[in-house]
Image (cartoon, rainbow, N blue to C red):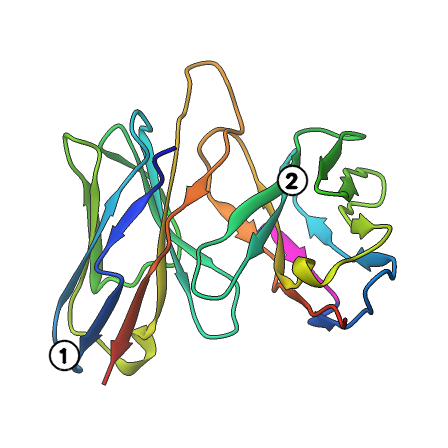
Amino acid sequence: AAGVIQSPRHLIKEKRETATLKCYPIPRHDTVYWYQQGPGQDPQFLISFYEKMQSDKGSIPDRFSAQQFSDYHSELNMSSLELGDSALYFCASSLRLAGKNRETQYFGPGTRLLVL
Amino acid sequence: GDSVVQTEGQVLPSEGDSLIVNCSYETTQYPSLFWFVQYPGEGPQLHLKAMKANDKGRNKGFEAMYRKETTSFHLEKDSVQESDSAVYFCALSINAGNMLTFGGGTRLMVKP
């Protein structure tokens, strides 16, 4: 079965640079979530999109922005990178069926970002 | 805000031992509860879930009971195997399409 695809898998940037992370959800999934996981930490929710509209917003810095495109893929744009942005960034997708709740989120393999 | 607490950062049972990994949650709403498992270099994978009070999630010999009265969702297994070694995250979500709130994770390292 197709899974969530994230690219790139690894990324090295310098401070103050920008980065773009891409997420391709499972086919027919309409909801995308972004999480950040620091070393030895639990994943922290950043932002989510449903049908190309922002759905929820968590602890996403103002330097970051994200969007979901017409083909449902999503991109997380990170500017003015800081050393503390070094982390694993996970994308998850789910299918939010009308009238049903609590669908499962399926996670991608993550993008490991290292800021030097 | 919502929160999930896992009291053990690491557990080190021997193969064949029984296991309980604690998970407590706090929310003013009515959550769905999950256990995710994460292997090195991979994203969290759903391990089991329970959608409402008194539901029991089951997978690969693991069980967790959604206990509303004690706001707990402890992960249990009668006999652990070395292949169960991984990091386990307890999590909750509220309503359709909402974010997951994770606990701090428990690293399970099963000794052969």
Q: Report if residue B33 is visible in the image.
A: no
| Image quadrant containing the C terminus of chain A | bottom left
Q: Position of residue A68 (x, y in %)?
A: 20, 39
**Nearer to us: label 2 or label 1:** 2
Q: Is residue A91 above or below residue A37?
A: above
Residue at the outermost bottom position: A116
Q: Which residue is mark 1?
A: A16
Could you tell me which residue is drawn at 81 percent across and 50 percent down?
B76
Q: Secondary structure at mark 1?
A: loop
Is residue B17 on the magenta stretch? no
Q: Position of residue B78 (x, y in %)?
A: 87, 50
Could you tell me which residue is drawn at 47 percent across and 59 percent down?
A43
Q: How many marks?
A: 2
Q: Amino acid at mark 2?
A: Leu
Q: Nearer the viewer, residue B86 or A80?
A: B86
Q: Report if residue A16 is visible in the image.
A: yes
Q: CA distance from mark 2 to mark 1?
A: 41 Å
Residue at the outermost top position: A99
Q: Which mark is residue A32?
A: none
Report the span colored magenta.
B2-7
Question: Would you identify the image quadrant in which residue B12 lies?
Answer: bottom right
Q: Amino acid at mark 1?
A: Arg
Q: Is residue B82 above or below residue B43?
A: below
Q: Position of residue B87 (x, y in %)?
A: 61, 63
Q: Which residue is mark 2?
A: B48
Q: Secondary structure at mark 2?
A: strand
Q: Residues within 10 Å of mark 2 (few under 14, many from 20)?
A: many
